Amino acid sequence: MNPQAKLVFVFSLLLGTTTTITSNHWIMAWAGLEINTLSILPLISQSHHPRAIEAATKYFLTQATASALILFSSMTNAWYTGQWDITQMTHPTSCLILTSAIAMKLGMVPFHFWFPEVLQGSPLTTGLLLSTIMKFPPITLLFMTYHSLNPTLLTYMAILSAALGGWMGLNQTQIRKILAFSSISHLGWMAIILSFNPKLTLLNFYLYALMTSAVFLTLNTTKVLKLPTLITTWTKAPSLNAMLLLALLSLAGLPPLTGFLPKWLIVQELTKQNMAPAATMISLLSLLSLFFYLRLAYCATITLPPHTTNHMKQWHNHKPSNTLIAISAVASTMLLPISPLISAIF
């Protein structure tokens, strides 16, 4: 892709995200979401492969449907209440439609079917954008309307997302699909606490974006897309694979790594809200996700020499990791010592 065109698309992506998260009017928020959708489509289909074109088509249809539902819910609310303000979403039908639309944009269960296929057909750098920046505007809308949403519906969707994200990722060998189901599982943790402590939802998203960035950037540097290829990367970059191991374990939520912090705080808050059964259930369901994280970490640490010519070529042409990978990987594994300060804030 032409560098100037890619710069325009990235700038449009940032513009759409900024427009949505800074707007108070539903029309402006909807316009920002549409700019985001249109700017990410060329980045998904830049390889011109049939799988990439299919992924771009699925993403466009899903996001267009979700945006139409958001616009319809805001118009319905304005018809009954006369308010276009995002924080004044009070009509019950509008709130229900809005919850479904944002769940569709995020890829939560039961609107999750598009996300693994789109991530599988996208390059790793675009997959990183889809997993982090593209989820920020919908989560911001959830944060601004959390007082109007149905906590029971969010709890059911959260538990189903955690269950299906862990269950469907067990038999996958494509790393992008594994990370897609990992995202669905983490969305369950974000949704279950939204109605009680929305700041914890943002904290969970920030840390998830940090840890996922470390994993995606590492995989992009080592050019790894499948589990069999991941086995051969230890001999190419031992230090980089060691950081990938820690980032994956942190993404799994194992103590004392950073990923354990938001889960610990969420379980603590759910217990305070007399939702101990839900906290227990989602904690047990996260063990399903733990299995494929451990499998990824195990494959990343196996020392096997490359056997094929392609692997030999990758082995000798490997480039060292950049500073961004090192910073994100270290931050995703070393933030837990300041957890008492973070827990005091949230």
Image (cartoon, rainbow, N blue to C red):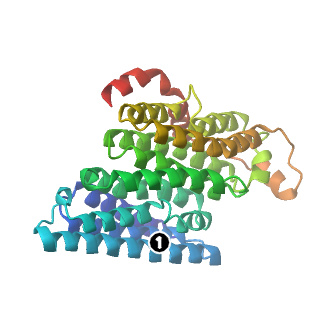
Q: Residue at x 52, y 32 (%)?
A: 260
| Residue 128 position within the rendered picture, expressed as x and y whole percent measured from the top left | 52, 54
Residue indicated by mark 1: 41
Q: Residues within 10 Å of mark 1 (few under 14, many from 20)?
A: many
Q: Quadrant of residue 193?
A: top left
Front residue (pair 119, 169): 169
Q: Is residue 182 visible?
A: no
Q: Residue at x 79, y 52 (%)?
A: 228
105 relative to 278, above or below: below
Is 191 positioned to the left or the right of 77 in the image? Answer: right
Q: Residue furthest left?
A: 82
Q: Is residue 325 visible?
A: yes
- Quadrant where the C terminus lies? top left
72 relative to 223, above or below: below
Front residue (pair 118, 80): 80
| Residue 131 position within the rendered picture, expressed as x and y whole percent measured from the top left | 49, 55
Is 168 positioned to the left or the right of 34 in the image? Answer: right
